[in-house]
Image (cartoon, coloured by chain):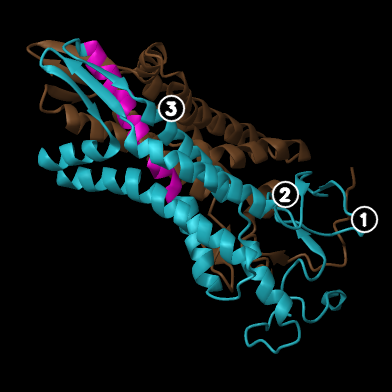
Amino acid sequence: MLAPDAHPSLPAALIACHECDLLQTEPVLAPGETARCARCGAFLARNPPDSVDRSLALCLAAAILYLIANVYPLVGLEMQGQRVEVTLAGALLILWRDGMQPVAALVGVTTLVFPLLELAMILVVLVPLRLGRVSPRLAPFFRLVRAVKPWSMVEVFLLGMLVSLVKLSHLADVILGAAFWAMAALIVVLTLAGRAFDSRLLWQTPVIENSP
Amino acid sequence: MSRELPFIARQARQAGLLNCHICGQLSRAPAGGGFLRCPRCRAPLHMRKPASLATTWALVIAAAILYIPANLLPMMSTASLLGSQEDTIMSGVIFLWQSGSWPLAAVVFFASVMVPLLKIFALVYLAASAQRRSRHRLIQRTRLYRMVEFVGRWSMLDIYVITILVALVKFQGLATIQAGPAAVAFGAVVVLTMFAAMSFDPRLIWDPAADSAPSSPDPDSDHA
């Protein structure tokens, strides 16, 4: 295994666009500003204010919402006084026992396992960062967050629930459970947390965070 | 210090620099090659995603083949006292349309029928144009790639609809809904096209243009 040198003669602010490979100097960003590639417009960096505090607060909120979304019923039907409700795990179990194991596994991974993994790994990175302990050992966890993120599809699942409820609305009254609203809030909070987190802080000393 | 870089180098590759896709650290590519790791965050480094085009082609072709059973086979079968019925993706859309919820019918049609199809065509176009080393529409192709990456996940919609339908109707007990064989094929199409988009390296779009005009003056290279 080779480790190429970081090349100290390169200007520190020199970066390459990850989508078109253009070399450019990274602009100094005021809080709230976003840098985009000069040629192709790809997202390069963002400087969110109070990055660590805000993203940590939002992630803790997301963890609570995730718990609610998985414990309480998502949706239900009411018909002649009879009420049936289903949780996420319950729905997966039915699909699995129905002989649709590949589909159940796909749904379980994208709505249950990967969102949890994403949340856990962000917290694993953020808590030491908040305590001022930036360590190269955090890097693999951050890589895992990046790898898992495209496969965590809570927002698509929420839309899927709405479509299925419309399909069933001629059969019975539909009920949106506590977990449904928790999941809707989870999507908002996770999006805000993603926007609040500046991954560049991981590769610097935390002192730089406070300088404007 | 920036004189270290060749003046004409606009791309990191031309300057012999590797860009870490995790932390953005640039490092000099050693002559020998081999398995490299980022000096800062230890992530694996490569100039371009390895075997990018071959992997993308393989995954797109597999997805295109599976798109056929995904649309022709039944997505779900409903059985009740009134009889039984099998639904494909398209007949599900028609049902939504006829029952008056046409905005949802449009959403499902777009997410389940159009997005996977357009995604397959877009990836074929991106891979073919990169392979022919086309120098046209660089920005448009980059945007197309970004769009493919962004919308791909929404095709999972129908899989989730089935999940909730099967569970709720089973609990309710008057009828049974079962997921059909198309559900597995459809899930595979979504997963394969997502992997195909991930394995395509958008920098391959820009490489031919960078290679062909090394000395031509460029109006927007004021950073050099």
Colour chain B appears in: cyan
Instruction: Give the structural element (helix, strand or loop) at label 3.
Output: helix
Look at the magenta stretch and give its main secondary structure.
Answer: helix
A36 and B173: which is toward the camera: B173
Mark 2 and mark 1: Cα distance apart in space: 27 Å
Chain ID, mark 1: B
Dot 2 crowding, Cα within 10 Å, few <14, some 14–19, many 20+: some
Going by the numbered disc 2, the residue's amino acid type is: Trp
Label 3: chain? A
The residue tagged 2 is A203
Residue occupying the point 44% across, 43% down: B153
Q: Is residue B114 magenta?
A: no
Local crowd size for mark 1, using a 10 Å CA cut-off: few (<14), some (14–19), many (≥20): few
From the viewer's perspective, tell me whether residue B86 is left or right of residue B220: left
Which chain is brown in the picture? A
Q: Which residues are magenta?
A: B151-171
Tell if the residue under mark 2 belongs to the same chain as the one under mark 1.
no
